[in-house]
Image (cartoon, rainbow, N blue to C red):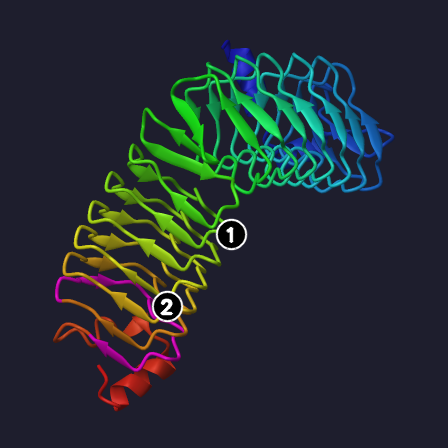
Amino acid sequence: MNNSLHKELVLTRVTEQNLTSGIEDEYGVLYSEDGEILLKCKSRKLETYSIKFGTKVICNNAFHSCSLLKQVIIPDSVISVGDCAFAFCHSLHSINLPNSVISIGDCAFVGCQSLHKITIPHAVTSIRFKSFLGCESLQQIIIPNSVTNIGNETFCRCRSLRQIIIPKSVTSIGNGVFTECVNLEVICDSKQFVFVNSMLIDKQKGILLSYNGNKSDIVIPDFVTNIGDKAFDKCKSLQQITIPNSVTNIGFGAFSECSSLQQINIPNTVTSIGNWAFYECNSLPQIIIPNSVTSIGDAAFSGCKSLKQFIIPDSITRIGNQTFEQCRSMRQIFIPDSVTSIGDWAFSDCPSLQQIIIPEGSTEKFKKMFDEELWDKLYESESL
């Protein structure tokens, strides 16, 4: 990429100087003085709009929340669409990206819930982070062979998507990419990725990237070593899951808001449980952490309101911030001597907690992990 082209792509970010010197057209859309950069749509009443020919860059947030906008015509002079450029344009149902476009920014079409079809131009190499998240009417999207990377949560909550083909050119797919796409069949032309039982898996890296099914009982294949970030996020139907001994890591928010999850067995090969991993798994009554785990992440079990029993093994050295916050049914907790660090408010809003056993001499050190009222109650009743 030559320097002048790189400079044009960088200019998707708008500065105060840009806004001050910009020229507004009769529709309330602000352009740079030379007309090559579309800075911002200042009108919220636009329903259709044709971007001026000669425009090269559509800046970050240019049409953000233009909720009445139904159609935009983009000339083939445009090479770059900025971050959140059309985010939350709820009425946008038609847009044609010309083949001149080589870059589409993060969250470019997030929340465009009326958008039903889009074709990615052949010069685009990356479909970025959350580009089409929440495009609930999107029925068809064509990914060209130029694309090598698909970012995290790119098509999350695209509930109307029926089929999508991952071309051979794709070598990297982010986590949670098809989460909540409950009607979707994924065809993987690349041998690196497989789609089995509604699970998209990077076989080469052993990462379970996303699950978009609605089964109550799931068995993860034994070639998976890593349950990726947000892989099962908001899987409301999931009640039971079997994790194989091949898995060593449970990622950030992997089972977040799986509100029906009642049973999970974590094998003794797992060494790390990420932040928010089981956040608001409201139906989970108990969980046993194996001796292989050394760290429990921030808010890992926050909001697990049915969790009554939790056994912390001697292998644990750190419990993160807010790890058990709002575990409102938890009655007792034993913290082994191996724990050297407990984050702030780790047991905040746990009104049923009657007893906690902590390492000798750690009373003041771990004080901030509770609500002050609960701490005083436990201290006065000698339950510490």
Residue at the image point whose x is 37% and y is 57% from the top: 263
Dividing the picture into quadrants, the one containing residue 7 is top right
Magenta part mainly helix, strand or loop? loop
Residue at the image point whose x is 17% and y is 55% from the top: 291
Q: Residue furthest bottom?
A: 380
Q: Quadrant of the C terminus?
A: bottom left
Above or below, 63 against 149 in this view is below
Above or below, 299 against 70 in this view is below
Q: Which mark is residue 237?
A: 1
How packed mark 2 is, by other alpha carbons closer than 10 Å (few <14, some 14-19, many 20 or more), is many
How packed mark 1 is, by other alpha carbons closer than 10 Å (few <14, some 14-19, many 20 or more), is some
Closer to the camera in the image, 243 or 339: 243
Task: Residue 6: say if magenta.
Answer: no
Residue at the image point whose x is 43% and y is 57% from the top: 261
As drawn, is 53 to the left or to the right of 357?
Answer: right
Closer to the camera in the image, 143 or 63: 143
Q: Earlier in the sequence, mark 1 or mark 2?
A: 1
Q: Amino acid at mark 1?
A: Ser
As drawn, is 250 to the left or to the right of 38?
Answer: left
Q: CA distance from mark 1 to mark 2?
A: 19 Å
As drawn, is 265 to the left or to the right of 139?
Answer: left
Q: Residue under circle 2?
A: 307
Q: Amino acid at mark 2?
A: Leu
* Element type where label 1 sits in the image: loop
Magenta residues (range): 337-357
Residue 298 in view (yes/no): no
Residue at the image point whose x is 76% and y is 32% from the top: 93
Above or below, 263 against 14 in this view is below
Residue 59 in view (yes/no): yes
As drawn, is 156 to the left or to the right of 48?
Answer: left
Closer to the camera in the image, 288 or 156: 288
* Element type where label 2 sits in the image: loop
